[in-house]
Amino acid sequence: MSGSEAGGTLAEMAPPQRKSRFGRLPEEFGVIFALVALIVLIAVLRPTFLNPANLVQQVSNAAFAGMIALAVVFALAIREIDLSVGWIFNFSAVMGAKAMVFGVDPWLAVGFAVIFGGVLGALNGVLAVGLRLPVIIITLGTFSMFRGLSLVINESRAVIPPDTSGTFFQLATMRIGGLVPVVAVVFVLLAVALHLVLHHTRFGYRVQAIGSNPEAARLAGIPIARTRMQVLILIGAVAGLSGALFLGFRGAIDPTTGQDFLLVVVAAVIIGGTPLSGGWGTVIGALVGALIIQVISSGIIFMGIDGKWSTFVTGAVIVIAVAVDQLVRRQRSRRALRFDDSV
């Protein structure tokens, strides 16, 4: 066996390790604690916030942008970021709705929307890999491309399927036990599935290895270009799925729905604990991060504050999360240096 082959095997079998900053507690403990503390704080001021129906609604409201955030964790883990996710969501939903308008069965239209999102993600991947440019540069352009094409297709008007009485729409709007929306359940199940993919599959190991040290990953034989492509296809397909579920849940897709998703998606991933430097990611953290953003937005309204402040607060939370991450990194570096000096 050659050194390269051996290195590749070891790199895939031993993904980057990350210890919790709380000892043996899960890495996501801190962000989960922050979510609980935030809910308690709002509930103290507005006790009706703890109504079970309201708490479940928070998960439902966070689901559509939150699903995309779960996939974007993979992008940040390889030191990339996709700026076009909001318009992949919108464009996919528009294409699915248009398919229904032309008489396609809703379930087939949903599958088409998911595949279409994956194709848009693949286009991002082909351009990024082919031109050897960072994904952020490519998606800065495809952001406008997808937006423009979506507006052309929907003619700047909401696209409304002619018949929303079918089983797909019934399922998308159904509440399990009369309380829990199906979209909230899909959100949580998708988080579990992608968590397992990131931390317990060869693909997930490759993503983390590339983000940790791209050059070492290349020398170990890990297919960097192919993995980047797969990550972008995953993001596109998940955005397409989210768009299809939104269409089923709302019964229509507006021409601008999703245009503000980018801030929420990136904020959820960063607040959830995935570092901008790559090499590691937490899908569960992204789920909790999306819930934190939703609770903040909802809490502001519960307090009687103008909802426009929610965008400011979200931005402020991003800055705080990044600052805390940097402080923790510096502290770890200092401890590592002191340990090396003492050896």
Image: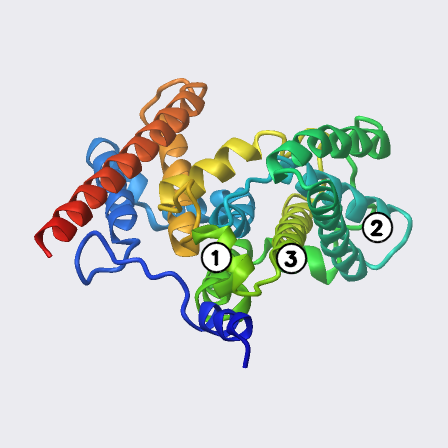
Q: Which residue lies furthest to the front in this view?
A: 2
Identify the residue under disc 3: 230
Kindly check if marks 1 and 2 are in contact, taking CB atoms under 8 A apart as contact.
no
Q: Can residue 301 be seen in this view?
A: no
Kindly check if marks 2 and 3 are in contact, taking CB atoms under 8 A apart as contact.
no
| Amino acid on which disc 3 is placed | Gln
Kindly check if marks 3 and 1 are in contact, taking CB atoms under 8 A apart as contact.
no
Q: Is mark 3 on a helix, strand or loop?
A: helix
Up/down of 314 relative to 214, above or below = above
Identify the residue under disc 1: 216
Say which quadrant the N terminus sits in.
Answer: bottom right
| Amino acid on which disc 2 is placed | Met
Residue at horizontal 75 percent and vertical 35 percent from the top: 146
User: Residue 77's x, y, as percent?
Assistant: 47, 50
Of 29 and 281, the residue lying toward us: 281
Residue at horizontal 45 percent and vertical 52 percent from the top: 213
User: Residue 185's x, y, as percent?
Assistant: 49, 60
Up/down of 310 relative to 108, above or below = above
User: Residue 326's x, y, as percent?
Assistant: 29, 35
Identify the residue under disc 2: 100
Q: Which residue lies furthest to the right in this view?
A: 102
